[in-house]
Amino acid sequence: MSARVFPRRSCTDILDSAIIRKVTWGYAAATLKDGHLMRLDKFLKVSRLIKRRTVANEACDGGRIAVNGKVAKASLAVKQGDIIELRFGERVLKVEVQSINEHATKVDAPGMYREL
């Protein structure tokens, strides 16, 4: 057997193909840079619904977070208008995403979502 030879590609080709492949529920990863979308685990941390991003990641892995009625992974791209359900034991918290901010102060964080 001969070894497989891969053609050489430039960094831009690799980046372009990665962006094209990286699609989450129909939203290209390139739009994450525009501020319209954010990873679910990061949104939960920035909005202070969950204190730490690693805890948010574990909650997603454990199936305790649902977005728009479907159990979601931590890497899901959340957009304005999405409904997030968080299950903490017996309690279920349902919120609607109002805005996406990269950083939020303690005062601004509750403005990122609306409790339903």
Image (cartoon, rainbow, N blue to C red):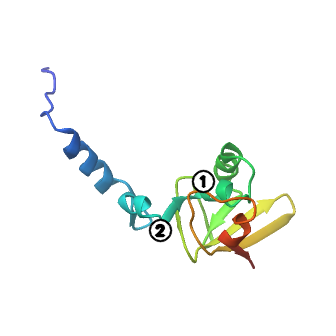
Mark 2 to mark 1 CA distance (whole Å): 13 Å
Residue carrying label 2: 36
Quadrant containing the C terminus in the rendered view = bottom right
Furthest-right residue in this view: 90
- Residue at 70% x, 66% y is 108
- Residue at 61% x, 59% y is 43
**Left or right relative to 113: residue 39:** left
The location of residue 36, given as percent across then percent down, is 47, 68
> Amino acid type of disc 2?
His
Q: Is residue 10 above or below residue 33?
A: above
- Residue at 73% x, 58% y is 48
**Left or right relative to 9: residue 94:** right
Circle 1: element type: helix
The location of residue 37, given as percent across then percent down, is 49, 64
**Left or right relative to 33: residue 4:** left
Circle 2: element type: loop
Q: Which mark is residue 14?
A: none
Q: Which mark is residue 42?
A: 1
Circle 1: is it few (<14), some (14-19), or many (20+) Cα within 10 Å?
Answer: many
Q: Nearer the viewer, residue 14 or 45?
A: 45
Quadrant containing the N terminus in the rendered view = top left
Residue 83, by quadrant, is bottom right
> Amino acid type of disc 1?
Lys
**Left or right relative to 31: residue 101:** right
- N-terminal of the two: label 2 or label 1? 2
The location of residue 29, given as percent across then percent down, is 39, 58
Residue 96, by quadrant, is bottom right
Residue 73, by quadrant, is bottom right
- Residue at 25% x, 51% y is 16
The location of residue 8, given as percent across then percent down, is 13, 33
Q: Is residue 19 above or below residue 98?
A: above
Circle 2: is it few (<14), some (14-19), or many (20+) Cα within 10 Å?
Answer: some
